[in-house]
Image (cartoon, rainbow, N blue to C red):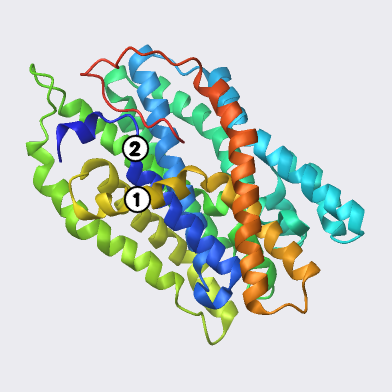
Amino acid sequence: MGTEQAERRYWPALDGLRAVAVLLVIAYHGERSLAPRGGAIGVTMFFTLSGFLITTLLLRERAKSGRIRLGRFYWRRALRLLPALVTLVGVACAYAWLTGNQEQTLSAAIGVLLYVGNWLRTLHDTEGLGLLEHTWSLSVEEQFYLVWPLAVLAAAALVSKARQAEAVLVLAVGGSLASLLWRLQLWDADQPRWSASRLYNGTDAVADQLLVGAALAAALAIWDRRHPPAATGELPVREGGTFFGFVGSVAAPLALAYVVFVARVHPGGDSLANDRRYLEWGSLTFALAAAVVVLGCVRAGDRWLPRLLSLPPLVAIGKVSYGLYLWHFPVILVVDEQLPDASDLVRGGTVVVATAVTTLLSWFLVERPFLALKDGPRTSAPAPPRQPAVPTRP
């Protein structure tokens, strides 16, 4: 790993990883046979990446200033997430009202905007949000964003400044185990459909997927503290060079191959029994695999997998992945509804064009202007060369 990778404020490979995740989700929604497990696995990858990035930001702010400005944190999250979501909900509700279809969309709109869509889905056995069905995962993330900074502050307050990352690591690992054990208790053999919905949508039942990423962020914070910049300003990467090299060259590629391969595997057989195995144990294995890939992306940038994920097309998709995730699902439903007799080629082409157009409109007209407010005014002065990296695109 080169020192420039450790000091980088933005890792393109993580946008490439976002692209892989969102493409798995789109494949699942667009043509389920392409990726029968792609939706669930893609969302798990997003969860783990979000846990990593948010925790990294929180720990860096705490280490630098001795505090976490919660108001600023929540304001930045709102600027990043809410404008595009409000736009989507408005357009979806307008379509539902004008066509008289998708009544579920109208009844679910307020819950989606309040970020409780995942619990509404639990009440309706994984359905009930209409054109907004896919926004359940955004509800889970927003609930995590609301609670996790408070948990980090509480953990940090219990220990000395030198041990705050260790406290967060213990909290993240302990929380992951608690979520797993709780999930194992939730399954009701007499109500398998409800159980599957509860385990898939409940924030408490999927918390480990986010906390695995948080644990990785805390572990890397501990590593960076124990291996600080040398007097020359260079990071002592040799101590971890062999390990990070192995991760980037072997472990991360195998982990990514694992999640992509399993995404392509059809459940087969008794789907409920298969879902139980996935929901109880499988999701955690995908979160761990995603964490390994993240580690390879941020600490082994000169290896082939981070270079592959940093290819411009993947990075470009990753940059607009939020809008792409928001718009692809309602576009698919509307096209299927409006063109029921069209050929697969016509419907598929219409979905691709309409999704691309709505995603780009969302990016340029909604997301980018609010991102400019979130990031504040830019200056031409370079960042101090010895400051550790902070990922800027959670």
Across the whole image, how many numbered discs are drawn on residues?
Answer: 2
Left or right: residue 172 compared with residue 69 = left
Q: Amino acid at mark 1?
A: Ala
- Residue located 7% across and 37% down the image: 238
How many neighbours does mark 1 have within 10 angstroms: few (below 14), some (14-19), or many (20 or more)? many
SS class of the residue under badge 2?
helix
Task: Please tell me in which quadrant of the rendered image residue 131 appears.
Answer: bottom right
Task: Please tell me in which quadrant of the rendered image residue 347 appears.
Answer: bottom right
Query: For this rendering, which residue is in front, 325 or 43?
Result: 325
Residue annotated with mark 2: 217
Residue 8 horizontal/vertical position (percent): 28, 31
Q: Image height check: is 61 above or below 101? A: above
Q: Image height check: is 267 above or below 364? A: below
Residue annotated with mark 1: 291
Left or right: residue 378 compared with residue 218 = right
Residue 5 horizontal/vertical position (percent): 22, 35
SS class of the residue under badge 1?
helix
Q: Earlier in the sequence, mark 1 or mark 2?
A: 2
Task: Please tell me in which quadrant of the rendered image residue 337 appears.
Answer: bottom right
Residue 329 horizontal/vertical position (percent): 66, 59
Q: Amino acid at mark 2?
A: Ala
